[in-house]
Amino acid sequence: MELLLTTLWLGGTILIGFLAVPVLFATINDRVLAGMVAGEIFTLLRYISIGIMVVLLLLQTRYRNLLKQWAGRLLLVILMLLLLDQFWLHPAMAELKANGLAGSEQFSRMHHTASILFSVNALLGIVFYYMLLQQQTFRKGA
């Protein structure tokens, strides 16, 4: 179950963030419209990701003490970054947009920070996925 959920989350994250959204900006001439669509896609992705992380954390606690295991700690970091992104960073960016400051330096910095958070989460997800595969292989070999 953990491997399936992680595959869905990581695959969706990589597909949307590194393929679909760049294609969206490359094909839609109106950057404001492309940004609005991308923002909605990322919001939906973050909510789905938060749900999957909560389920994965619950699965981790079912088997072991969450904070004593690498997987539990890694999932907590991913979840915290998702929550930070969804409930602090993006509302602040939306407020700047609403005030007509979408082209401001502050918005640009926040957008850059959001991009870094997304990339870090994807990288942490790859690490988690690899370690989960190693753990599954070890269980089968034992």
Image (tube, helix red, strand yellow):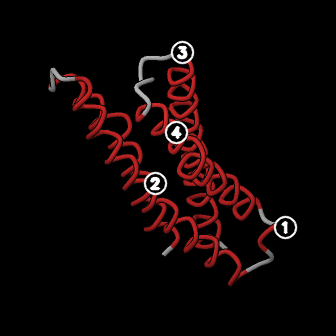
Q: Which residue is mark 2?
A: 46
- Residue at the spot 65% in from the left edge and 59% down from the top edge: 75
Which element type, helix, strand or loop, lies under badge 1?
helix
Residues at badges 1 and 2 in contact (C-beta under 8 Å)?
no
Q: Which residue is mark 3?
A: 105
Which element type, helix, strand or loop, lies under badge 4?
helix
Q: Nearer the viewer, mark 1 or mark 2?
A: 2
Q: Nearer the viewer, mark 2 or mark 3?
A: 3
Residue 72 quadrant: bottom right
- Residue at the spot 67% in from the left edge and 74% down from the top edge: 60
Q: Nearer the viewer, residue 71 or 116?
A: 116
Residue 71 quadrant: bottom right
* First along the sequence among labels 4 and 3: 3
Q: Which residue is mark 4?
A: 118
- Residue 38 vertical placement versus 66 (above, below): above
Q: Nearer the viewer, residue 32 or 48?
A: 32
* First along the sequence among labels 1 and 2: 2
